[in-house]
Amino acid sequence: MDTTILRCPGCGANIQFDAQTQTWLCAQCGTQYTAQDIFKLTTDSDLDTKINEPQPTLNVYKCQSCGAEMVADENTTATFCVYCHNPGIIKSRLEGEFRPDYIIPFQKSKKDAVNAYNAYRKGKYITFKEFGDPKNIEKITGVYVPFWLYNGRSQAYVAGKLHTSSSKREGDYIVTTKCVYDIERAGYMIFRNVPADGSVKFDDNTMDSIEPYDFTQLIPFNYSYLSGYLAEKYDVSAAEDQSRAKYRMENTLINKINGTINGTLTDETKNLDTSIDRPKYALLPVWMLNTIIDGKPYTYAMNGQTGRIVGNIPISKANALAFFLIIALIAMSIVSAISYWLFM
């Protein structure tokens, strides 16, 4: 099994992609490389750095910088050495059918992700202390998540009966008028780059919630952008994910059609027809923090391109009780003080 790292041509130290400057930086000599520089320097033959192959069933890789072992599961394509923190790209896992067509590079840095996380948890006093532990926050990690991007066309026909009712006073009587209308609607939509994450590791609802991505910034895949981040290859095929994309297309069209109907239909019938093209395979940037608190998993995620965040907040019952007791004591103190000054 091969791993790949990027080395500075000037000093030989490792270089990593920096989201803030959109360049590659050498931490040793400070040299900054543009995408044009990197692509000239990193042909496939230049980029490959071979190492001794470990037992493949163990998924253990030797860090070329310090010699320590790096452990990764079968779907990890880029990882870190836990000792020297240098990145390693398992290039052989990104070949053939697993080679992405496109990538959106990180636009948001780890500093951006940490600042957003701190802003997100600000004022949440009844959470577990681990929620704001700097050691925990430091574990926020940039991950390239595998996505399938689908193009397609969907058409729909909707029919049913719409019931309306109105009342008005006529002299001593309230007159109610009820009407039943036959309603028919038809629509057609073209979809571009409908995403569905291709990894069982990442919760579908979380990945959907940090959308949208700006797909005008899709660029052809290059290994160099993985330097400094974790990355995964897909383990959910395009065929398996297609049903999600189809549902999203049809649901979007039906919602648009229903928006033209002022009411709810009865005796409703729907006819849907959707065709989907061969999807593109892309890696999209996500900042992630997974924490186990009081035996339960909590996830914080930020779109590494746009900064959109989503997360579930761990509530501590003990902290909540203490917080409300403090509020109650403060309120009682204020009431006592006011009563004292009013009746002294």
Image (cartoon, rainbow, N blue to C red):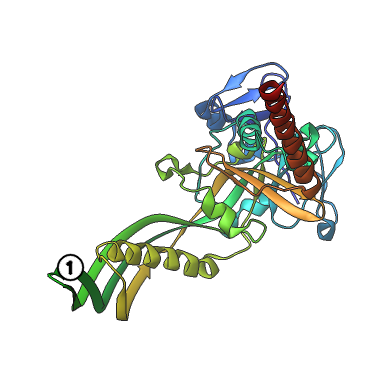
- Res 131 seen here: no
Examine the rendered structure and indicate whether residue 280 appears above or below residue 70. Answer: below
Q: Residue furthest front?
A: 343
Q: Quadrant of the C terminus?
A: top right
Examine the rendered structure and indicate whether residue 121 appears above or below residue 30. Answer: below
Where is residue 78 drawn, in percent x and y?
69, 45
Examine the rendered structure and indicate whether residue 250 appears above or below residue 159. Answer: above
For the residue pair 317 and 235, the one nearer the viewer reads as 317
Q: Amino acid at mark 1?
A: Lys
Residue position marked by numbered label 1 in the rendering: 168
Mark 1, secondary structure of its residue: strand
Residue 70 location, quadrant = top right
Residue 66 location, quadrant = top right
Residue 249 location, quadrant = bottom left
For the residue pair 275 and 180, the one nearer the viewer reads as 180
Where is residue 72 drawn, in percent x and y?
77, 51
Where is residue 15 drawn, in percent x and y?
67, 28
Q: Please tell me how crowded label 1 is: few (under 14), some (14-19), or many (20+) other residues with Cα within 10 Å.
A: few
Where is residue 251 drawn, in percent x and y?
39, 66
Residue drawn 70% across the image and 36% down it: 5
For the residue pair 121 and 147, the one nearer the viewer reads as 121
Residue drawn 35% across the image and 70% down it: 275
